[in-house]
Image (cartoon, grey):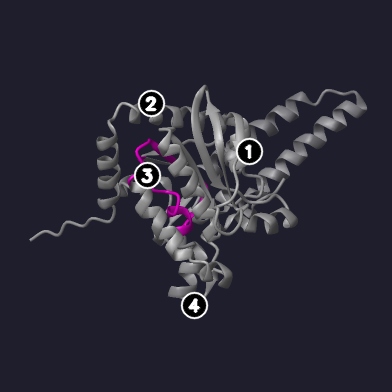
Amino acid sequence: MGMLDFEKPIVELESKIEELKNFGTDKNISLDPEIKKLQEKLEKMKSEIYSRLSVWQRVQIARHPDRPYTLDYIRMMTTDFIELHGDRQFADDLALVAGFAQLNGTKVLILGHQKGRDTRENVKRNFGCAHPEGYRKAMRLMQLAGKFRLPIVILIDTPGAYPGIGAEERGQAQAIASNLRDMVGLKTPIVATIIGEGGSGGALGVGVADRVCILEHAYYSVISPEGCASILWRNSVKAPEAAEALKITGEHLIKFGIVDEIISEPAGGAHKGPEQVAMALKNSILKHIKELSRLSQEELIAQRYNKFRKIGEVIESQ
């Protein structure tokens, strides 16, 4: 399991507790009082560290290699998942997966960015950075869901859309722009959740939703902290300062009206209790789908349009 720098004291104490347990078992002696004291110390340490996380530390948790990805949540939350492939123009993009499934008996289209667990899979999934064909595949299937009035569930986890030459030649910017335009007019409920990284247009390209939620330690930003630091200070080492200035956590985004709900995670992140987070995420999605299903198609589209028109609105005093 991966360990972040600020988690080192926690991991060291956990190792010490495990050593004491093994020693007691091997020597057939009881070390329960000592173990209990260390466990109490461990809980206190976790509480202190995880309650005072900086924005940059939360970005690191959002990128944790053990964090659940889209296919993990699909496995934990849904039944009868059938993955669909291809944009019918160029190819299938494995960085963005999509298909039909059931959430507690509710039929939905579910799609999201997918990263890899090792180098080989990351290359295959392009590190969760979608190509134009990924966004076109997503739009093709979202329009299909709209035709049959099936709710759309979106899980966002990408550092950004792929900026390579091939992607630009195949119309990366237009693919994202077309999605922004066409998602506004879909006549079916759309619920999106940022489950890890929500980077720039790569995230927004599938993020025009009636309800936008975010996991507690995920982030949503117009640019990555490293990219911002490279532009402003010509030095990516300044990423922690950029992260603070960008206001990219759930608490900031709620105030700005960009997200509608923060979904709690266990201390240390979603990878510490993936089943627990999956259950909370599923309940949140079903709640929003139920609320949105009461609206007429005209009300749904009008509310979605107004929601995004208000973002960034500034009122100046005279």
Q: Is residue 208 above or below residue 244?
A: above
SS category of the residue bearing label 2: helix
SS category of the residue bearing label 1: helix
> Which amino acid, mark 1?
Asp
Q: CA distance from mark 3 to mark 4?
A: 30 Å
Please tell me how crowded label 3 is: few (under 14), some (14-19), or many (20+) other residues with Cα within 10 Å.
many
Q: Is residue 15 above or below residue 59?
A: above
In the rendered view, does 158 fall on the left or right side of 16?
left
Q: Residue at x 43, y 43 (%)?
A: 143
Front position among marks 4 and 1: 1
Mark 3 vs mark 2: which is more N-terminal? 3
Q: Is residue 174 above or below residue 303?
A: below
SS category of the residue bearing label 4: loop
> Which amino acid, mark 2?
Lys
Reading the image, the residue beneath label 4 is 234
x, y percent for residue 69? 60, 44
| Range covered by the magenta-colored residues | 185-210
Reading the image, the residue beneath label 2 is 290
Disc on res. 202: none
Residue 266 visible, this orientation: no
Reading the image, the residue beneath label 3 is 259
Q: Between 229 and 288, which is closer to the camera in this rendering? A: 288
Mark 4 vs mark 2: which is more N-terminal? 4
